[in-house]
């Protein structure tokens, strides 16, 4: 945190900040070209080697304090890592949860929990890639989730189901949000929820079942079923009934980080499309000479630059310890829109070849679309702005 006390004191870096990190990430990404990702996509396989390279370089421990073996970098630096991966055509979303899911342990864990888990998460020995919040019947209405944990001596017994739990098969630990006090016994619906750090390796086959969920993109996502799964009470993070705050606290950081991925995507689409527009000759001239091709790319570039500025502002406010809910949400909205518009322009620029797998455009187009829906849908961001920024009635 710097010495700034108001937003007026905060300055925003322009241009290529953290150049050494950018260079280093670009070098790592050069070993993982399109063919690597196409092959994984075809096999619906996890990018184990890529995630290992990021882990070995210390980047997935970017936000873990030095005392626990992490790099203790600013949030912006961690975002730059993700952005450069996506700008290079890699898919860091496969690993990003390792960066921020541990934030709940860091902010709300006991000293014993931090000492037990954070150094091993920092070294990559323990993978904390899975985050179980969404449920099939309640979706966005998180506080209505139905998975229940009931205390039984020094354990809790968990019953219920999660959906879209990404990377549960590739993770040792799962951060799990459950209800510990029924809705009809609490005053506010955000009360009575609790967070557990579940040791997937211990629980698998003992009340925990994970099933792959086939999806439009290779996101290694799953359905997770709990049938009397026993979790030690010592794995409760942040106290019983305090789980919603535990998760909510990390939302601004999460939004800022994933926005960097969208900016990276937009950079890839615009670069790839501009190159193709110069090279592809139809009617005896480069297609980029046609305004119908050129202008959507120019507009996408303008949108990306504007979103990038908002993102830099959000990250700077976050780092200064100042309120940044509005800015983090706006950055998420604008960057995911910029990425999607760039994806559309890139697809259109490539014509039929946009559909050919070897160009990577269709895969990256599918991947960019997710940011309109997860980890938070665009409507929920607009609802936040309408209510918390513009002061209109709560719409849900
Ligand atoms: C590939 C992928 C990976 C994911 N990974 C994870 C993960 O690791 N962990 C996890 O917990 N979840 C994960 N999710 C789930 C994701 O966070 C949810 O899909 C998302 O939050 C939306 O929930 P839903 O799908 O149930 O949509 P619903 O809640 O059913 O909503 C459907 C649509 O209605 C809109 N809507 C609903 N209510 C309102 C309202 N009041 N006002 C305006 N619009 C509204 C929504 O915005 C959305 O567009 C993942 C999803 C996908 C697709």
Image: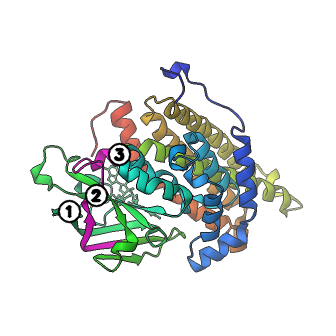
Instruction: Say which element carries label 1.
Output: loop
Residue carrying label 2: 234
Residue reaching furthest to the right: 284
Measured from the top left, where is residue 238 in percent x and y?
Answer: 30, 48
Query: Nearest the camera: 125 or 77?
Result: 125
Q: Position of residue 204 (x, y in %)?
A: 36, 76
Label ID, residue 154: 1
- Residues under labels 1 and 3: Cα distance? 20 Å
| Residue for point 17% across, 44% down | 188
At label 1, counting other C-alpha atoms closer than 10 Å, the crowd grade (few under 14, some 14-19, many 20 or more) is few
Q: What stretch is highlighted in magenta?
A: 224-247
User: Which tag, 1 or 2, sits closer to the chain's start?
Assistant: 1
- 96 on left or right of 209: right
- The secondary element bearing badge 2 is classed as helix
Residues at circles 1 and 2 in contact by the CB criterion of under 8 Å? yes
Rendered location of residue 66, percent (x, y):
55, 44
Quadrant location of ligand 1?
bottom left
Task: Please state which of residues 237 and 244 is positioned toward the viewer in this rendering.
Answer: 237
């Amino acid at each position: 945190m710097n010495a700034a006390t108001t937003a007026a004191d905060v300055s925003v870096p322009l241009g290529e900040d953290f150049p050494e990190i950018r260079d280093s990430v670009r070098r790592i990404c050069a070993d993982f070209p399109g063919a690597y990702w196409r092959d994984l996509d075809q096999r619906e396989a996890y990018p184990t080697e890529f995630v290992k390279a990021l882990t070995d370089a210390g980047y997935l421990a970017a936000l873990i304090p030095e005392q626990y073996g992490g790099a203790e970098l600013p949030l912006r630096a961690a975002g730059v890592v993700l952005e450069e991966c996506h700008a290079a055509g890699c898919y860091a979303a496969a690993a990003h949860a390792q960066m921020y899911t541990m934030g709940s342990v860091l902010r709300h864990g006991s000293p014993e929990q931090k000492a037990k888990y954070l150094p091993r998460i920092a070294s990559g020995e323990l993978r904390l890639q899975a985050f179980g919040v969404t449920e099939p019947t309640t979706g966005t209405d998180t506080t209505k989730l139905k998975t229940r944990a009931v205390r039984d001596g020094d354990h809790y017994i968990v019953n219920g189901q999660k959906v879209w739990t990404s990377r549960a098969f590739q993770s040792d630990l799962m951060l799990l949000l459950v209800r510990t006090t029924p809705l009809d016994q609490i005053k506010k619906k955000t009360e009575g929820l609790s967070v557990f750090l579940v040791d997937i390796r211990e629980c698998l086959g003992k009340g925990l079942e994970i099933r792959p969920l086939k999806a439009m993109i290779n996101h290694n996502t799953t359905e997770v079923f709990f049938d009397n799964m026993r979790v030690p009470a010592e794995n409760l993070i942040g106290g019983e009934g305090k789980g919603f705050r535990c998760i909510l606290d990390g939302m601004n950081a999460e939004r800022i980080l994933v926005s960097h991925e969208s900016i990276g995507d937009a950079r890839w689409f615009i670069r790839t499309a501009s190159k193709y527009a110069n090279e592809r000759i139809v009617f005896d001239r480069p297609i980029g000479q046609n305004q119908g091709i050129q202008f959507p790319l120019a507009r996408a570039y303008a949108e990306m630059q504007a979103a990038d500025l908002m993102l830099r502002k959000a990250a700077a406010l976050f780092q200064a310890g100042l309120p940044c809910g509005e800015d983090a949400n706006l950055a998420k909205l604008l960057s995911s829109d910029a990425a999607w518009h760039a994806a559309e322009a890139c697809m259109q620029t490539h014509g039929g070849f946009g559909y050919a797998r070897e160009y990577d455009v269709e895969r990256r187009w599918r991947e960019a679309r997710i940011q309109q829906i997860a980890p938070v849908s665009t409507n929920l961001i607009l609802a936040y702005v309408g209510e918390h920024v513009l002061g209109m009635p709560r719409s849900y």
